[in-house]
Image: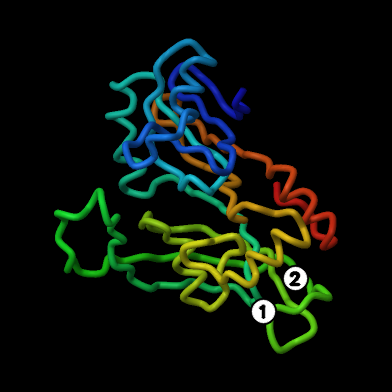
């Protein structure tokens, strides 16, 4: 059962678990569980995704309850009229927040995009980020006897593929658990010491003006047990 965090006559939103694909993909033929199909069976009607979350990312994922609603609302996402807030645990300490305006080249899949233009211009990508808490743990990942980590809040102002993961890696503060853009030593430490086997990136909230009722809507999704244990271990307030 998926946790439904919002539902009205137009939309339904769930707290997507880490590791679950949004919909069926020929790139992952062996997978049998998908958010779209699971949610459809759970509520007894078709759902239409309005955005996506990477497979390893958890958090707020919203669907329209008809294709007509989806076609009307999709421009809101395309024009970034929805405010998304994410939380992540990253390597190292970031002392102060800021805005990273760093263009990203399109990430192409070796199989799915083999016929795509490989030389497209980098696209504008902007992320606001704020450090919330930090910790120094008594484990080494290199030349120092301890290792530092930081709890981050991030708000993407654009929607590029893997934007937050790539932006944090660009700042030399990769997200823990990122096997594509991260640091294997830190991922290994979290697996072995804290039993954390996931990307520590969570879509915590989605805020928008409802296109039909014109009311402000704020949808929140709680972090999972892995996150809760880590926050308790580090003495951090659990993101809400």
Residue 40 lies left or right of residue 185; in this view the side is left
Residues packed near mark 1 inside 10 Å, few (<14), some (14 to 19) or many (20 plus): few
- Vertical placement of 208 versus 100: above or below? above
Q: Residue 73 at what x, y percent from top left?
A: 34, 33
Tell which of 30 and 133 is nearer to you: 30
Residue at figure coordinates x 43%, y 29% from the top left: 63
Name the disc covering residue 33, or none.
none
Location of residue 75 in the rendering, given as x and y in whole percent from the top left corner: 29, 40
Q: Position of residue 5 (x, y in %)?
A: 61, 29
Q: Is residue 169 above or below residue 74?
A: below
Task: Return the disc, 2 or 1, that comes first in the chain's sequence.
Answer: 1
> Who is closer to the viewer here, 107 or 185?
185
Q: Which residue is mark 2?
A: 134
SS type, badge 1 = loop
Asked if disc 2 and disc 1 are in contact, CB closer than 8 Å, the reply is: no
Name the residue tied to disc 1: 95
Residue at 79 percent of width and 80 percent of height: 146
User: What colour scheme does the image use?
Assistant: rainbow
Q: Is residue 63 above or below residue 82?
A: above
Number of other residues with Cα within 10 Å of mark 2, as a class: few under 14, some 14 to 19, many 20 or more: many
Q: Quadrant of residue 96?
A: bottom right
Query: Is label 2 in a helix, a strand or a loop?
Result: strand
Q: Quadrant of residue 51?
A: top left
The residue positioned farthest toward the top in the image shown: 44
> In screen coordinates, is 113 left or right of 46?
left
Image quadrant containing the N terminus: top right
């Amino acid at each position: 059962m998926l946790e439904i965090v919002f539902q009205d006559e137009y939309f339904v939103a769930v707290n997507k678990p880490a590791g679950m694909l949004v919909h069926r993909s020929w790139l992952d033929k062996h997978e049998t569980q998908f958010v779209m199909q699971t949610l459809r069976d759970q509520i007894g009607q078709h759902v239409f995704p309005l955005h996506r979350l990477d497979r390893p990312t958890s958090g707020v994922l919203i669907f329209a309850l008809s294709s007509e609603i989806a076609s009307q609302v999709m421009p809101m996402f395309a024009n970034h009229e929805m405010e998304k807030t994410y939380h992540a645990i990253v390597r190292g300490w970031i002392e102060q927040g800021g805005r990273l305006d760093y263009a990203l080249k399109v990430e192409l899949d070796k199989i799915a995009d083999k016929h795509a233009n490989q030389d497209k211009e980098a696209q504008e990508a902007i992320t606001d980020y704020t450090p919330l808490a930090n910790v120094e743990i008594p484990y080494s990942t290199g030349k120092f006897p301890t290792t530092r980590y930081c709890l981050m809040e991030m708000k993407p102002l654009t929607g590029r593929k893997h934007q937050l993961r790539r932006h944090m890696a660009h700042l030399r503060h990769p997200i823990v658990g990122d096997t594509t853009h991260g640091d294997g030593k830190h991922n290994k430490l979290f697996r072995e010491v804290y039993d954390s086997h996931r990307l520590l990136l969570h879509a915590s909230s989605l805020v928008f003006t409802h296109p039909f009722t014109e009311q402000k809507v704020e949808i929140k999704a709680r972090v999972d047990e892995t996150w809760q244990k880590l926050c308790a271990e580090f003495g951090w307030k659990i993101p809400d």
